[in-house]
Image (tube, helix red, strand yellow):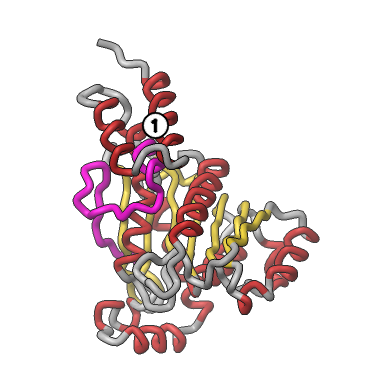
Amino acid sequence: MHVDTTFLEYIAEEIAEEARAGYLTPEEGRRRLALLFGDSSASAAVLIRAQASVDPAVTIPENDPAIAVEMVSYPVPEGSIQAYLARPRDGERAPGIVVVHENKGLVPYIRDVARRLARHGYVALAPDLLSPVGGTESFSDPAEATAALGRRNPEEMVQDLREAVSYLAAQPFVDAQRLGAIGFCFGGGMTWRLTCTDARLKASVPFYGPNPPLEQVPNIRAAVLGIYGGLDERINAGIPAIEAAMAEHRKVFEKEVYPGAQHAFHNDTNPDRYHPEAARAAWVRATEWFQRHLGS
């Protein structure tokens, strides 16, 4: 029997809307979606998008049947970079997104972010920028990992991220014309710098990242969404300058500042800073930005 995926998607969106409004729990929303799709031949991408939109901040396990994950590596001048790759299992060509970690390296939280993006229909690549000094897992003390990142040359790390973009663009399951980047804290700053130096990017979402060198702003080709926490005074002090620079050079830029949220509020493994409501709202905003500028 022919299945009208457009009609299924319409009903799935209604279920997701009820869950987001609080009329259904995330668990009940996912149960109803499973019943709706059942054993139909509907596109896996439709189901992935619908399930993810029900509970946008849900943790995605590595064995989620809708995605495939693996560790990969790609060459850079100083050796090679290890990276975590997550992608939809349906095998269709999809937009690619580079995920840039915080200052503690490629930790489980960042891997989960990559899996969340894969559930939304994107191919996500999260490089370990500590690879040239042994990799994140070689540091038992997170403070030592942070110190090691601090000793790396920022320009080399930007080049490592540019090579990540190249790696994504070369994969047969990635649409090389639809590439983006997202990063958090230190990674938000590196996402800004990558966006300033790689014209292949079409969309970027730096979360509470320090500004890039403002003289590089004219080079930006991507549409940028800046995410900020209302209590993050140190980072927020730079918002007027980046807004002015983006406006002066007629770049596409929007921002969201979430009241009551601290720096690193999206990290759900950090109970001291995690802000569930802001994290969920910011994730919806970020994925809508990618949908608008990259599609899925």
User: Circle 1 is placed at which residue position?
Assistant: 15
- 35 to the left or right of 110: left
Q: Nearer the viewer, residue 206 or 179?
A: 206
Q: Nearer the viewer, residue 195 or 34?
A: 34
Residue at 62 percent across and 64 percent down: it is 196
Residue at 30 percent across and 65 percent down: it is 73
Residue at the far right in the pictured view: 248
Magenta highlight range: 49-74
List x then y, in percent, for residue 155.
53, 77
- 74 to the left or right of 14: left
- The quarter of the displayed image where residue 276 is located: bottom left
Tell me if residue 168 can be seen.
yes
| SS for dot 1 | helix
Residue at the far top in the pictured view: 1
Q: Nearer the viewer, residue 54 or 74?
A: 54
- Reply yes or no: does residue 58 show up in magenta: yes
- Label 1 neighbour load within 10 Å: few <14, some 14-19, many 20+: many
Residue at the far front in the pictured view: 23
- The quarter of the displayed image where residue 239 is located: bottom right
Task: Relative to 280, say whether 80 is above or below.
Answer: below
Residue at 24 percent across and 22 percent down: it is 40
Q: Quadrant of the N terminus?
A: top left
Q: Quadrant of the C terminus?
A: top left
Q: Nearer the viewer, residue 199 or 191?
A: 191
List x then y, in percent, for residue 201.
55, 54
Q: Tell me which amino acid carries mark 1.
A: Ile
Query: How many labels, in total?
Result: 1
List x then y, in percent, for residue 160.
44, 70
List x then y, in percent, for residue 137.
25, 77
